[in-house]
Image (cartoon, rainbow, N blue to C red):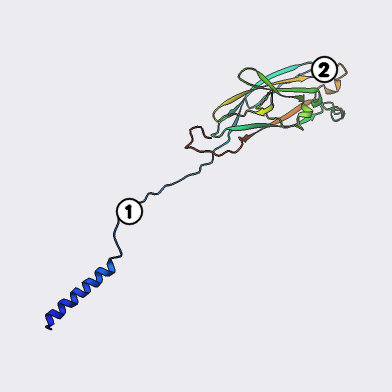
Amino acid sequence: MSFTKKVSQGVMGAALGLSLIGGGTFAYFSDSVETQNTFAAGTLDLGLNPSTVVNISNIKPGDEIYREFTLENNGTLDIGKVLLDTSYTVDDAQLDGKANQDDLAKHIKVTIMYNTSSSTNTVVETTLHDLQTKQPDLTQIDNLAGPYPDGIPAGEKEKIFVLFEFVDNGEDQNQFQGDKLKVDWTFNAEQTDPAYHDDTDPDNN
């Protein structure tokens, strides 16, 4: 066999081997897409207008003071509850110790009402003294099934009405002359109950 023929057979054998080796592979098109997902926390932002609910002097037994204020949801999340915390101090003007014996706050009746679309709803009616041991939800509404929280949707406002009364008990209340009652109210907003939120469901069910 000539040298040329041997070389030709060798080249053909090598090409056949390569074709057998490459026969199990193939080329194909491909594509991919990347998504960037973000979880941004919403905000609870409770506003109060005006910032001072009541500031009055020279009250006497039998006086009634009516005030209105607005709770504003300036955040991006619905507020489910607005809980009220109460604390106070009494300045005993006469320094006779009677302020500790008969707390002026026991003689101040507080009625807080929440405004609904049809009427006002009494949230709490008690003395200022007893209110410090309670934490009422100012957005709570009473219905036939019992009280339930209504809350404040994001961007909405709710008006609250308050009636303070210096109760005249028909007895000598001279020990309270000149006393000052300093009341601190703290409004605590809480979010609505956690729930699964599905943006693909138009009803968010």
Name the disc covering residue 30, or none. Answer: 1
Q: Could you tell whether 164 is left or right of 155 in the image?
A: right
Q: Residue at x 29, y 59 (%)?
A: 27
Q: Nearer the viewer, residue 170 or 159?
A: 159
Q: Nearer the viewer, residue 188 or 12?
A: 12
Q: Residue at x 85, y 27 (%)?
A: 102
Q: Could you tell whether 163 is left or right of 150 in the image?
A: right
- Give the answer, above or below, for where 75 lies relative to 66: below
- Look at label 1 and name its amino acid: Ser
- The image position of residue 147, as x and y in percent, is 69, 27
Among the 4 quarters of the image, the one containing residue 167: top right
- Tell me the quadrant of the picture where the N terminus can be found: bottom left
Q: Which marked residue is nearer to the observer: mark 2 or mark 1?
A: 1
- The image position of residue 127, as x and y in percent, is 78, 25
> Spatial distance from mark 2 to mark 1, Cα to Cα?
86 Å
- Give the answer, above or below, for where 170 lies relative to 50: above
Name the disc covering residue 77, or none. Answer: none
Q: Could you tell whether 135 is left or right of 115 in the image?
A: right
Under circle 1, the secondary element is loop
- Residue to which mark 2 is pinned: 168
- The image position of residue 149, as x and y in percent, is 65, 29
- The image position of residue 112, as x and y in percent, is 70, 23
